[in-house]
Amino acid sequence: MSIENIVPIEKILAEQGIFMGQFKGVSMRPLLQQGRDTVVIEPLSAASPVQEGDIVLYKSDAGRYVLHRVIRHTPGKSPEYTFLGDNCVTLEHVRADQLLGRLTAFYRDGRKYTGDELRFRFYELLWCRPWQARVMALKVRNRIRKVLRHG
């Protein structure tokens, strides 16, 4: 899922300490939906390091803003993170210097949601944590759709 903005988001985070905005794409469905949800991104801090399961905004080498879930962290001299959108099958390898902020909440129909709610914890437990099985299921679904479309 990408977030497009005229003013660089990293500048907004540095100056205002928060970014709220809309996004484009389907990669974080079913949790987040384009045109319906507004995301709240806060800067990362040393006091609260990025954890597996966090939804983090990063800037790709191509300059696109991407909001996906961290599924693995490889610590070391040059730490690297592995990301995967909740509706994606391709892993993304991201350097620590590309990370910009963490999703702390989102708004849907005027109501604020956070990851602390029980239903989102179940969602993460059942859909996000078993990511290998989810990737396999999505690949099978995509293959079936392709066969049905093209006969």
Image (spheres, rainbow, N blue to C red):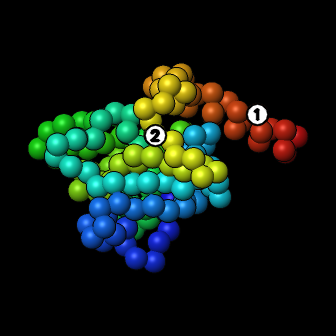
Residue 88 visible to the viewer: no
In this figure, which residue is indicated by the disc labeled 1? 144
Q: Classify mark 2: helix, strand or loop.
A: loop
Say which of marks 2 and 1 sits in front: 2
In this figure, which residue is indicated by the disc labeled 2? 114
Mark 1 is on which residue type? Ile
Q: Nearer the viewer, residue 106 or 86?
A: 106
Q: Residue furthest front?
A: 110
Residue 74 visible to the viewer: yes
Q: Quadrant of residue 79?
A: top left
Q: Nearer the viewer, residue 8 or 119?
A: 119
Mark 2 is on which residue type? Thr
Instruction: Return the x and y of residue 150 as percentages of the image width and height.
Output: 84, 45
Q: Nearer the viewer, residue 146 or 126?
A: 126
Question: Is disc 1 surrounded by few (<14), some (14 to 19) or many (20+) residues within 10 Å?
Answer: few
Q: Residue furthest bottom?
A: 6
The CA distance from mark 2 to mark 1 is: 34 Å
Q: Residue furthest right?
A: 151
Query: Where is the C terminus found, in terms of image quarters?
Result: top right
Instruction: Return the x and y of residue 99 as percentages of the image width and height.
Output: 30, 54
Q: Residue at x 41, y 48 (%)?
A: 103
Question: Is disc 2 surrounded by few (<14), some (14 to 19) or many (20+) residues within 10 Å?
Answer: some
